Image: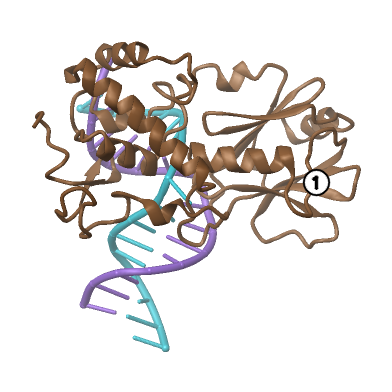
Chain colours: A brown, B purple, C cyan
Amino acid sequence: MPELPEVETITGLLREGRHDKPSLIGLRIENATILWQRTLEIPKPEEFISCIRGQRIKQIFRRGKFICFQLHQHVFLVHLRMSGDLWVEPETTLPAPHHRLMLHFNNGWRLAFNDPRKFGRAWLVTDDQTVLGKLGPEPLDGSFTETDFFQRLRASHRRLKPLLLDQNFIAGLGNIYTDEALHLARLHPLMISSDITENQAALLLSSIRQVLQEGIARQGASIDWVYRGGDFQNFFRVYQRTGQPCLVCSTPIERISVGQRSTHICPVCQKMRAA
DNA sequence: CACGAGACCTGTTCGC
DNA sequence: TGCGAACAGGTCTCGT
């Protein structure tokens, strides 16, 4: 499900609280429940529960598509993969059918990791680099420059779309925002990264930043039955708009397959060769 | 090194 | 209406 803007939105909700829901900052973890064993990547369930008990949440932040809870002795990390969601609910609520893991706090609330498809994963580690160590740069980090991006693109000989989806190349992009960014930059997803010009690379980075910031401003996108509250789906340029007119040139959007992911392009705006 | 196929999972939607 | 196929916002591993 979630890409950077959705994960950012969820992270903010947990950190700041919303409406009737409390922020998790400062809360003490009294206990944990593991409802689906494979959701917990590391460590073993017994060790996880004994380690996490009694620790307070100092800070909550996002890195790529990971949600990270800084505790006193450890870092608790969650990746939502395709269908995961993370929310706070009262202990009086009956656990929903797809809850996979819960953290119970000292104030009558709990954190629920709900994940119908069971692809999501959680980790409890002392050093977050154990999990995050190989991630590529944060696209919205100002210290990541156009020059850095251009050089990274030139350094590999891969098609743009699978490369942008590679979290070790750049962190946080998924199928939606990659298609949106490539369309905004007028680049074909099959273009080889080492063929890109400096100007095209600069345009691609600014396009990536623009679509991510639009997504964050709209609280992410809500598609299918996995809903979280954002409305960026109403502003897609190409994603899931097959057959509908390109917002730039009115040509019908086409759907192709790239690296076994459905990919949406405008065949006129996004040529393999520069126009 | 780069790529395709298959695996991991459940739920919804599409086509006949 | 029913039923199988296709598809879904992700990532890993394996073989070529």
Q: Is residue A159 left or right of residue A209?
A: left
- Rendered residue at 15%/49% (across/down): A249
Quarter holding residue A103: top right
- Rendered residue at 41%/24% (across/down): A170
Q: Position of residue A79 (x, y in %)?
A: 58, 36
Q: Position of residue A82 (x, y in %)?
A: 49, 46
Determine if residue A165 is in view.
no
- Rendered residue at 21%/35% (across/down): A186
The answer to whether residue A214 is above or below residue A115 is: above
How many numbered tags mark residues here?
Answer: 1
Quarter holding residue A7: top right
The answer to whether residue A134 is above or below residue A95 is: above
Q: Residues within 10 Å of mark 1 (few under 14, many from 20)?
A: some
Camera-nearest residue between A196 and B12:
A196
Quarter holding residue A101: top right
Camera-nearest residue between A38 and B12:
B12
- As helix, strand or loop, the secondary structure at mark 1 comes to loop
Residue assigned mark 1:
A22
Of the residues shown, which amino acid type is indicated by label 1?
Answer: Pro
Q: Position of residue C10 (x, y in %)?
A: 45, 38
Camera-nearest residue between A15 and A134:
A15
Quarter of the C terminus of chain A within the rendering:
top left
Give me the chain letter of mark 1: A
- Rendered residue at 53%/50% (across/down): A83
